Image: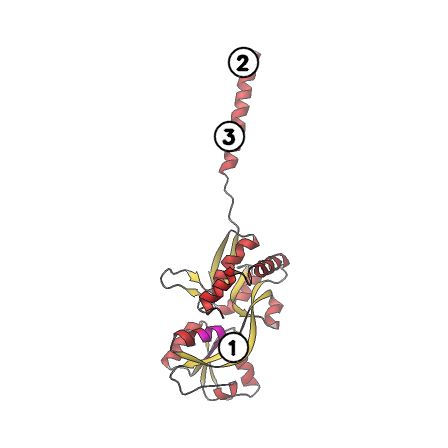
């Protein structure tokens, strides 16, 4: 009788163990997601594809390339106004800022960065315009567009403060596209944007770049003090730069330049 009870007990224990094992097999691992903050109004760096409505561009494709090498399973693009991106790092709303953000001392006080591409700030006008400014001094008495929170805005403001130009009507936009629309409509005389973007507009659309005001270096930013993430980002970027994948991105978005 006791032998029969023992058999029943062993059978029950085996069933319990099998149940625990099977339950463990059904557990799902939550994918590790890298939240990338951007302002998707700045082709070729970041923009919305008109056909697929997906976020694309050099910066975003680059982050999708880097994320697996950093230990992440997927990338979530968080679109926002440009001037809110760096503060969003400090507020833990995003993990990485990728939006052709120029590295400046002021920004390095708020966040850490790794350099990834050389850029600059250039003046752009309509292709048929007789106004061809070569410096800030040429902007006196003109209407000039800048994107809020950018080093283009800072460059113009500092030039005016230094007396390089006077009576400049500076129009400040939350989106570069809004500024370019006003430029196209003749509401402003010139726009200040990053050199690669200005060159793209000059090549593909009815605009021309007249001068580069300043050379700069753009960076990918992380929250201040997050050395683990910064090191992972730096190592992944070092691994990718110069490879076929990197060169393909450069060719796709900048014609290889």
* Cα distance between the residues tagged 3 and 2: 23 Å
Q: Secondary structure at mark 2?
A: helix
Looking at the rendered image, the disc whose residue lies closer to the viewer, 1 or 3, is: 1
What x and y, as percent, mark residue 233?
A: 58, 59
Residue at x 42%, y 83% (from the top left corner): 189
Within 10 angstroms of label 2, few (less than 14), some, or many (20 or more) residues? few
The quarter of the image holding the N terminus is top right
Q: Of 131 and 149, which appears nearest the observer? A: 131
- Give the residues drawn in magenta, as a range: 191-199
What residue is shown at x 53% (from left), y 32% (from top)? 21
Mark 1 and mark 2 lie on one chain; the one further toward the N terminus is: 2
Nearest the camera: 214 or 237? 237
Mark 1 lies on a secondary structure that is: strand
Q: Position of residue 248 (x, y in %)?
A: 48, 63
* Nearest the eye: 243 or 144: 243
Counting residues from the start of the chain, the first of labels 3 and 2 encountered is 2
> What residue is shown with label 2?
4
User: Residue at horizontal 52%, vertical 64%?
Assistant: 98
Q: CA distance from mark 1 to mark 2?
A: 86 Å
Residue 167 can be seen in this image:
no
Task: State the image quarter where residue 239 is shown.
Answer: bottom right
Assess whether mark 2 and mark 3 are in contact (beta carbons under 8 angstroms). no
């Amino acid at each position: 009788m006791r032998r029969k009870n023992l058999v029943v007990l062993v059978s029950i224990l085996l069933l319990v163990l099998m149940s625990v094992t099977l339950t463990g097999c059904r557990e799902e691992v939550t994918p590790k997601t890298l939240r990338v903050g951007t302002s998707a109004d700045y082709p070729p760096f970041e923009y919305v594809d008109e056909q697929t409505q997906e976020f694309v561009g050099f910066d975003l494709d680059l982050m999708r390339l880097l994320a697996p090498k950093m230990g992440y399973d997927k990338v979530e693009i968080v679109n926002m106004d440009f001037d809110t991106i760096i503060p969003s790092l400090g507020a833990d709303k995003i993990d990485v800022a990728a939006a052709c953000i120029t590295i400046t001392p002021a920004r390095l006080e708020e966040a850490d960065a790794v350099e990834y591409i050389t850029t600059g700030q250039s003046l752009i006008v309509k292709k048929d315009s007789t106004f061809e400014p070569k410096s800030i001094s040429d902007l006196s008495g003109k209407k000039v567009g800048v994107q809020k929170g950018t080093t283009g805005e800072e460059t113009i403001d500092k030039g005016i403060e230094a007396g390089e130009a006077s009576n400049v009507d500076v129009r400040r936009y939350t989106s570069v596209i809004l500024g370019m629309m006003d430029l196209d409509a003749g509401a402003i005389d010139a726009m200040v944007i990053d050199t690669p973007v200005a060159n793209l507009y000059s090549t593909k659309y009815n605009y021309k770049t007249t001068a580069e005001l300043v050379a700069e270096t753009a960076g990918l930013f992380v929250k201040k003090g997050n050395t683990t993430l910064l090191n992972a980002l730096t190592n992944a970027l070092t691994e990718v730069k110069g490879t076929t994948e990197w060169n393909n991105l450069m060719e796709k978005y900048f014609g290889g330049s």
